[in-house]
Image (cartoon, grey):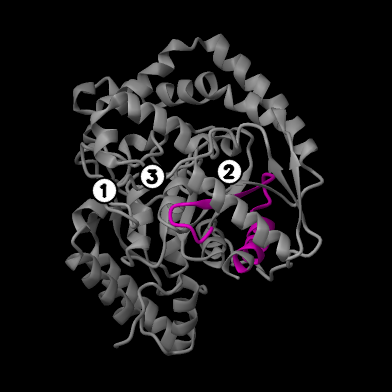
Amino acid sequence: MTGIELTQSASAQGRAIEAGHLDPRDLTETYLSAAEQHQYRDRIFTMLTPKRARAEADAAAKRAKSGLRRSPLDGVPISWKDLIDTAGYPTEAGSLLLKGRIPDTDAIVLQNAARAGLVMLGKTHMTELAFSGLGINPITATPPNVNDPALAPGGSSSGAATSVAFGLAAAAIGSDTGGSVRAPAAWNNLVGLKTSHGWLSLQGVQPLCPSFDTIGPLTRSVEDAAVLACLLAGEKAHDLTPPGLHGRRFAVCTNLMLDDLRETPRHAFESALARIKTAGAQIEYHEFPEVTEAAALTGPRFVAEAWASCRALIETNPGVMFASIRDRFRSGAAYSAAEHIESRMALDRLILSFWQSAAGFDGILMPTSSILPPNAARLRDDPAFFTSEGLLGLRNCRPCNLLNGCALTLPTGVPACGLMVMAAPGKDIALSRLGISIEAALDS
């Protein structure tokens, strides 16, 4: 079939399949061919899985012909971050520490996706063990940024983002522990959904910080992200009728989130706010001290847990790791058990206080990242630059994980600049409905 648009949204492709205008087999072959021939194939995909993709596409085509489609995205091809177990295919989490690891079973989220009829195209590169938001991985591969191949792609779901941004997958599945869906989505002009902790199963997913790890989609539209998240949860797609923005009340977090904001992200954020206001929303500037206090607990609460989760694996052969990532892991050893427990209790109090303060707002608005994507080669070669840019790159994303929220990043129209909307835990679908209205305002 000719005329297939690989940059069409996953939901639009699903509707075309439903209407009989698009054959999942043709769609899958077109994506596989595009990926195989792409100049950055080996920097984006750890592998393509054509045998599985063709079998799943063939089954989807038969269901479509019989009127037995399993979901709105039945027959749509997507990619998977290489920390999500795939039966019979390597899952190595971007690290030589896991080289040759082949799971026996799919992760639960992949099982749910398969039941919904989604087609698995392949596995994507990522930051080593998912512990950086920059997307740099000199050990396996660093994907190119879609805006400029010399720039960092954002991480840790770097290949996931670029597989969609370059038109090599209809959507991608990544993970977000401190911004690892949102940062690469924003830096590659995509939508990214950080789901509520615990909504999507982590069984069969390589852990980083189990208290904060989440699975989330990277997509071309908010609709795609919301539908995918529901299917990954093993649920039917929810009603996504947008509520509009007239009378909606948003807070702009003035403390921390606007600090050291560089010129282009600042202008992009201000322009996005203006369009949201024009659509009828009320925007108030509000200080949330809990955000700053939670961010201060990153070391004892977040880094310490990452070290505890991965220490045994890392110390089997630390010499094979990218030094900047290995040293960041090892910094977690500086925190005592007492500090970790005290930080957990403090964070529990902050979560309660924050969401009480935010209860009167429909969402909290902030720039997704305070910086633009840095030069990848300099990040690789300059450890001090890697550290400073890494802290700034994820600074705005991380508090959402620490404060147990869900969040959505949307393109602002300025390359590599995203607008983030944060909402309370469990409000993923309400946030997505609102996000569709925001998306329309930003496109106006």
Where on the picture, by quarter, is residue 8? bottom left
Depth-wise, is mark 2 or mark 1 nearer the camera?
1
Q: Residue at x 46, y 48 (%)?
A: 181
Location of residue 14 in the rendering, given as x and y in whole percent from the top left corner? 47, 77
Residue on which the image places disc 3: 373
Give the quadrant of residue 119: bottom left
Q: CA distance from mark 1 to mark 3?
A: 10 Å
Vertical comparison of 330 with 401: above or below: above
Query: In front here: 302 or 133?
Result: 133
Q: In the rendered image, is residue 201 in sight? A: no
The tag on residue 150 is 1
Q: Residue at 24%, 47% (x, y): give it.
A: 90
Residue numbers of the magenta segment: 412-440
What amino acid is labelled 2 in the image? Answer: Gly
Instruction: Report which residue position mark 2 lands on.
Output: 198
Neighbor class of circle 3 (other Cα within 10 Å; few <14, some 14-19, many 20+) is: many
Earlier in the chain: of badge 1 and badge 3, it is 1
| Residue 314 shown left or right of residue 209 in the figure | left
